[in-house]
Image (cartoon, helix red, strand yellow):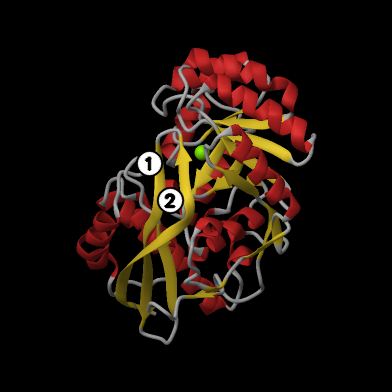
Amino acid sequence: MKITHIKPIPISIPLKQPFKIAYGTHTVYEGVILVIKTDSEIYGIGEASPSSKITGETQGTVIDIIENKIKPLLLGEDPLNIEALINKANSAISFNSSAKCAVDIALWDILGKVSKQPLKTLLGGGGDRVEISITIGIKPIDATIEEANKLITDGAKILKIKIGLNPREDIEKIKQLRASIGYTPAIRVDANQGYTVKEAIWVGKKLEPYDIEFLEQPVKPYDFQGMKQVKNSIAIPVMADESVHSLQDTIRAIREDICDLINIKLMKSGGIMNATKIAAAAEGAGIKCMLGCMSETKVAITAGTHLAIATENIKYADLDGHLGLEKEIVEGGVITEEGENRISEKEGLGVNCRGIL
Ligand SMILES: [Mg+2]
């Protein structure tokens, strides 16, 4: 089997509401859907969700890298040699993790279709669903409580609350939220690098009575010592997100003991193959992982859901990026209901994007 065509397609989808987190506000998702065709009738679909702040990419750089760097590397190759192809891309191209992720997802989709198995079976097997958190961006306390109650009515089992801009208000927000909703559902919080070390420790201690699952990325990603200080000072588990992109970051985070948990994202790791290595390294160190996401369509969210379902050491899922999009361009893939992502037994990812291919 040979790769014959690689085609990146830019997509631009407005968000249902502006999404504000500690380092910025988004109103539109600008990503790339990737199609890899072969000399058989089988083709694979992937996706890149670039982020200038996180992966250092834009929609334009993803298309440029795929057209000018990845295409010459992969055309004519056997798409089933996934690890060799991903390692080849990693060796030839630094950074650009979401562009590589798009390729990786499409290759796994091809493997699933060739072997007539759903992606999760290729990755270790497992059930057909995973509980996910539903995220509320930074907004005033009243609006946060209103949205939380609506999400709970709609079946949300876990809420993820974005914080990190105003320590005092963040504490008050969680206090009032718990007063309104009680002690279910679970709440996890994400500061997206917004605090100083001192602020993070103060907020972390003040949030201890409110049954918080974990605090994500309290301080700047490069501040490993700061992350460690926060981790060692508060009872709430600290999760590294922006501090850990790659397998190499994971090893460093383990050696320097900076976190209790790691948030793996396909867009940071460069896809499923690298993500499985991160999950395995973390497992060896006794660190449980979450599978998170960016704004993504159901292509990448479905890939992440299969991986989360198949991987024992991925204990948490934050795979709701598709829910924020105004328009659905993907057929098939995950069904999100009652706070869970469910997958089918269809081959590969079980998705298509006929409307844009
Ligand atoms: Mg995060």
**Measuring 51% from the left and 26% from the top, which residue is drawn there?**
218
Residue identified by numbered label 2: 267
Question: Picture coordinates of residue 353 (x, y %)?
Answer: 45, 76
Whether 215 is drawn above or below 323: the answer is above
Quadrant the N terminus occupies: bottom left
Secondary element under disc 2, as helix, strand or loop, is helix
Quadrant the C terminus occupies: bottom left
Tell whether label 1 touches label 2 (CB within 8 Å): yes
- Horizontally, residue 102 falls left or right of residue 259, namely left
**Occupied quadrant, residue 208:** top right
**Measuring 49% from the left and 52% from the top, which residue is drawn there?**
17
Disc 2: CA contacts within 10 A as few (<14), some (14-19) or many (>=20): many
Residue identified by numbered label 1: 54
- Under mark 1, the amino acid is Ile
Secondary element under disc 1, as helix, strand or loop, is loop
Which of pointers 2 and 1 lies earlier in the amino acid sequence? Answer: 1
**Measuring 61% from the left and 20% from the top, which residue is drawn there?**
204
- Under mark 2, the amino acid is Met
Instruction: Answer yes or no: is residue 321 visible.
Output: yes
**Occupied quadrant, residue 220:** top left
Q: Is mark 2 within 8 Å of ligand 1?
A: no
Question: Picture coordinates of residue 209 (x, y %)?
Answer: 74, 21
